[in-house]
Amino acid sequence: MDFNMKKLASDAGIFFTRAVQFTEEKFGQAEKTELDAHFENLLARADSTKNWTERILRQTEVLLQPNPSARVEEFLYEKLDRKVPSRVTNGELLAQYMAEAASELGPNTPYGKTLMKVSEAEKRLGAAERDFIHTASLSFLTPLRNFLEGDWKTISKERRLLQNRRLDLDACKARLKKAKAAEAKATLWNDEVDKAEQELRAAQTEFDRQAEVTRLLLEGISSAHVNHLRCLHEFVKSQTTYYAQCYRHMLDLQKQLGSSQGAIFPGTFVGTTEPASPPLSSTSPTTTAATMPVVPTGAGLAPPEEAALCLEEVAPPASGTRKARVLYDYEAADSSELALLADELITVYSLPGMDPDWLIGERGNKKGKVPVTYLELLS
């Protein structure tokens, strides 16, 4: 009991001394040991890493789960070390509603058939989103959380210890200074000076040891950056795969809707020429993020006068042909179209009555319709 009481008294005395030293430093009444410039730079880089990691983590969580209530629920499950229950994605929920609507409104009607087709596409999109969320959480969010809850907590603990050792050191310096001043006035050797010097040497040793430990941890931030870089590549790869899947699913759906609407509304075109996400390779996260246009869904659905056109009998106009560079690969939907390979050069021209979204393309002895948005026309 006596030992515990003495320890509590000693701890209280140390805490009080540190509080006095800290307060006097704040008011400019005490000297403060400054860390070297390199150490200060390490501290600043560590703080910046922690702050930006927190921001990136929070915003990525918002990206993967926009619903704040769902994020709170997932956080609680994680803290309780319980498995997060499977949640239906918005795309899958929309697919369910469309399928139910088609069943009730008539699955054999044009509207019902289209609802079923879109429902299947939305279901595939929802499944792709689920896979993306799962992969991104494991490969990106988890390592960031581990850094904040593991490495950073250790660094913070050692930094607090270093701050305490620094306050102890400066308090010893202040006591020694006062002891020497008292000795000078008494003009005789003061035992307090010897005691203060011993305490200062011990405090300096503790401070130097803690500074070295903290320095090593701060320099380890470089390793954290390397790990975060690898995780960032994994995140980009998973996001690339997700958007590529979405592009393929929607392109297939657009072609299905184009053929079905052509049967219902002959001579019309479906879709838009607005840009869509590019079909990036899932194996190459560094693939350029150029914007690939959606193919006009009128592919193969030409006006009556164009539908009757025999491409073999088409001759290029005497003037008006141009060279064009192909921007993206394009797979011909039928025999009236010309398949394209990215970066190849072809000759293109237009014919009277053609839809403005299409041109006639020639490559060697092959010719066919090509979408304008896949080309860069050269002068």
Image (spheres, helix red, strand yellow):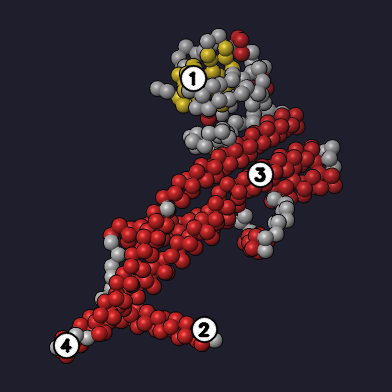
Identity, as a three-letter code, of the amino acid under mark 2: Asn
Residue occupying the point 46% across, 66% down: 157
Q: CA distance from mark 2 to mark 4?
A: 38 Å
- Asked whether, in this view, residue 79 is left or right of residue 362, the answer is right
Q: Is residue 323 visible?
A: yes
Residue occupying the point 84% across, 37% down: 108
State which tag comes first along the sequence, 2 or 4.
2
**Residue 14 screen position, x and y as percent:** 40, 81
From the image, state whether disc 1 or disc 2 is nearer to you.
2
Callouts 2 and 4 close, C-beta under 8 Å: no
Q: Is residue 272 visible?
A: no
Write down the residue under mark 2: 4
Identity, as a three-letter code, of the amino acid under mark 1: Glu
Write down the residue under mark 3: 131
> How many marks do you count on the picture?
4
Write down the residue under mark 1: 344
